[in-house]
Amino acid sequence: MKRVVLLLIAAAFTWSASAAEASRYEYDDDDHHQGRYESRAKFYGTVDALPPAVNNGTWWVNGREVQVSPQTRIKEKRGRAAVGAYVEVEGYFSGSGVAASEIEVKGHRR
């Protein structure tokens, strides 16, 4: 019973941390990207998962899908792009997630 309560507390804490990060989500509907009307996105979060080729594929950041292509600028001045890294993601809303134009590693969450 004690384990179940601890797991529920941990899940609630994780959810509230994700909700706090969601409040940092910004968008701008006035931008045009590659001739299409799209909304710009910018948010901060912790990398949950990476594809085998870090510069091409789907990243998961705070439970959000982030599409990365060879054209995405990945800045690693403050750390490496890895699971657990705290990052700033900039790009455009696309389908179920964000098509990243730039990802900057800010460090690791403590």
Image (cartoon, rainbow, N blue to C red):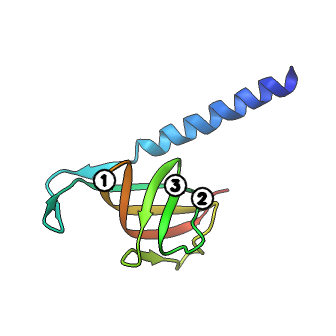
Residue 61 - label: 3
- x and y percentages locating residue 27 in the rendered image: 27, 51
Q: Quadrant of the N terminus?
A: top right
Q: Is mark 3 on a helix, strand or loop?
A: strand
Q: How far apart, in angstroms, are the residues tagged by discs 2 and 3?
A: 7 Å
| Observer-nearest of 20 and 80 | 80
Q: Name the residue under label 1.
A: 93
Q: How far apart, in angstroms, are the residues tagged by discs 1 and 2?
A: 19 Å
- x and y percentages locating residue 69 in the rendered image: 41, 72
Corner quadrant of residue 99: bottom left
Q: Mark 2 points at which residue?
A: 49
Does 7 sit left or right of 90 as displayed?
right
Task: Name which residue lies at 53% across and 55% down.
Answer: 60
Does 13 sit left or right of 103 as displayed?
right
Q: Quadrant of the C terminus?
A: bottom right
Dot 1 amino acid type: Phe
Which residue extends farthest right? Answer: 2
